[in-house]
Image (tube, rainbow, N blue to C red):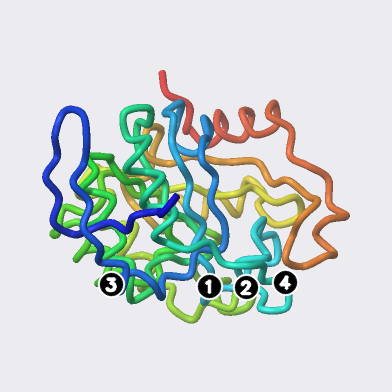
Amino acid sequence: MRIPTISTHFQLRTSQISIKGVGHLVEGFAIGGFTKLSLVDWFSKVVSVVFVRGCNFRCPWCQNPDLVDPGRFSELVPPKNVLAYLARRRDLLDGVVVTGGEALLAPELFAFLEAIKHTGLPVKLDTNGSNPDKLLHLFESGLVDHVAVDYKLPFRLYPKVVGGLCPDAVRRSIVTVLERECGEIRTTVVPGMHTREVLAEMLAEIPGLQAGNYRLQAFRPGNCLNLEFNERVAIEKAYLAELAQNLGLLER
């Protein structure tokens, strides 16, 4: 069966979507993986997850090394196949999560998101925050509904630990999301790195972080970019809850 491509010009109807080929607009979009159904990537929503290849950070605890390290790249998923699936299943989905890697590095991202939005599905974007201007453009274009910015460490440690030389850019992205009240900021708590003192320093750097817009998530070993981090212990939920309580991050 021929798989249709998706047009940026749709006629949305109750029973069908009129699809006209514009595969050339997104054919270079490097999708390194695609999960058809997930219940854990956007709260409890039923979503599909698109994993975009390529990243400008090298976080040692990264859980997607096959999207970051060229030596571990796997076969790409054709964007037209993903878009065709989303068009067919849009009535069964609550939305689409686009993550990475770092999706904002991809020049085809805007066309891809526009194609998704024309299916009527809401979009969540995960980002490391290194491209605040592109992020703002996405908001202004109405192409994203929810954004999660990863706040890795105190900004003074970004160049040393994650290889990101743009802490000011990350700060701008975080502030943009907080001001628009359309997303969340999150930190992966890694053993030996994110002590209570370190997290308190991070909270002090960004006024406005609080329960409801800032979330701590647990580190999981086993598939880290830096293999040494696979030897570290997983963070227990009880410890994460204790940290959140001590930092005033539990909603009352």
Q: Label 1 amino acid?
A: Cys
Q: Label 3 amino acid?
A: Leu
Q: Secondary structure at mark 3?
A: helix
Between discs 3 and 4, the one toward the N terminus? 3
Q: CA distance from mark 1 to mark 3?
A: 21 Å
Q: CA distance from mark 2 to mark 4?
A: 14 Å
Q: Nearer the viewer, mark 3 or mark 4?
A: 3
Q: Nearer the viewer, mark 1 or mark 2?
A: 1
Between discs 4 and 1, the one toward the N terminus? 1
Q: Label 4 amino acid?
A: Arg
Residue 72 circle label: 4
Between discs 3 and 2, the one toward the N terminus? 3
Q: Residue furthest right?
A: 231
Q: Label 2 amino acid?
A: Arg
Q: CA distance from mark 1 to mark 2?
A: 8 Å
Q: CA distance from mark 4 to mark 1?
A: 13 Å
Residue 209 x, y percent position in the rendering: 37, 45
Which residue is denoted by mark 2 in the rendering? 58
Q: Secondary structure at mark 2?
A: loop
| Residue in the picture at 42% in, 28% down | 45
| Residue in the picture at 60% in, 54% down | 198
Q: Secondary structure at mark 4?
A: helix
Which residue is denoted by mark 1 in the rendering? 55
Proximity of marks 2 and 4: CB atoms separated by less than 8 Å: no
State whether residue 88 is above or below residue 33: above
